[in-house]
Image (cartoon, grey):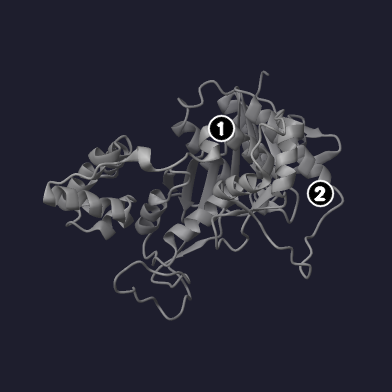
Amino acid sequence: MEINEIPDTLKSIIKNAAEKLGGAAKREYVAKITIELLGGSARKAESEVGWSRDMVKKGMGELTTGIGCVDNYSARGNKKTEEKMPELKEGIRSIVDPKSQTDPNFQTSFAYTRITAKAVRQALIDEKGYTDEELPCENTIRNIRYRLGYQLKRIQKTKPIKKIPETDAIFENVDEANRQADEDPETLRISIDAKAKVNIGEFSRGGKSREEEPEEASDHDMNPEIKMVPFGIFEPTTDHISIVFSTSIETSDFVVDCLELWLDGNKERHANIGKLVINLDNGPHVNSHRTQFIKRMIEFADKTGLRIHLVYYPPYHSKYNPIERCWGVLEMHWNGTLLSSVNKAIRWAETMTWNSVHPTVHLIDKVYQKGVKLTKEAMKICEERVKRLGNLPKWDVTIEPAGW
């Protein structure tokens, strides 16, 4: 039996078992699976299961020779500062993250930040209570920031960022709402957005292939048979990602169906949650004045009993939404792969990792209709259930469940 003949549930068990092992035991396990199910191909182990090719080769070498490699951890030198001070790492992340955005072209997994290492160090003193003597030097802070996936980007003066008068106030509101959510154990914050549609077919995607012989793509990317809409739900405090694919179109109904699917699959993990803070941009399908979206979110609140707090990023700044960084990682992960079928796209998405965590991937096989909207009278009734922030009514919306 080959691994592509194994049910997805069993394949997931194989992956999870490997993650619970370490060192020589893990190498022996993955080597045996590779030999039995993947024809001894370390390349297939990497593409099909997501295991490191070097680790697989090392494990198969140990099986063949009977000689085990000793992991000499004590000889690996001094630990990094963030390993010795884990709370420092989280402090830096909480300062840098609100001031960072993903690469607009999805060409790197790094997030571009507008705050310098010097400013981060001072913020640790002013906001986190550190003393100057407790903190490492500015260069070390810069290195930690880099290892966490944040780097500065040169400003392009020829391409000014568009702003509206409320931009700064919106960012302040987002930062404060996110901080309060992350500090409250009964509140969960998620970040949601859809990625650009993915053409399914023998199309070149501009990347590079890891295959020994590069795959040949069609010379034109015209008229794909299927276009898939990927929708992501990211939990910044747990690094859990859910990706839902649709072969239909992105609509308000699709967005809320994705939220319901995500919550149904994570009820046990979030049994103590009473409030859900949602980071999102003000795109056409999730706009705070999109009548069908507000109606469905009210129904979602009533169905789940959760207080819903919609916290919008300002226009032209959607790349600051945390879910966007996951799209950058996914784009780099499947890179030059020819996504020739729906199943192949889903399997590649499943093997992506974000901070060593694989996403949960679903497919919604449902046809959605465009242009669904409420009458003015029906929307007036919905508005009675909605509380908008006084100075930012379009950018901060709270929905209480019925009976609250």
Residue at 65% x, 52% y is 101
Q: Which residue is mark 1?
A: 85
Density class for disc 2 (Cα within 10 Å; few <14, some 14-19, many ≥20) is some
In what element is the residue under mark 2? Answer: helix
User: Is 387 situated above or below 371?
Assistant: above
- Of tags 1 and 2, the one toward the viewer is 1
Residue at 46% x, 31% y is 266
Q: Which residue is mark 2?
A: 167
Left or right: residue 397 compared with residue 330: right
- Quarter occupied by the C terminus: top right
Residue at 66% x, 31% y is 134
Residue at 75% x, 39% y is 122
Q: Position of residue 372 (x, y in %)?
A: 63, 49
Dot 2 amino acid type: Thr
Dot 1 amino acid type: Met
In what element is the residue under mark 1? Answer: loop
Q: In this view of the protein, which residue sits in the foreground, 265 or 19?
A: 19
Q: Earlier in the sequence, mark 1 or mark 2?
A: 1
Residue 153 picture quarter: bottom right
The answer to whether residue 178 shows anywhere in this view is yes
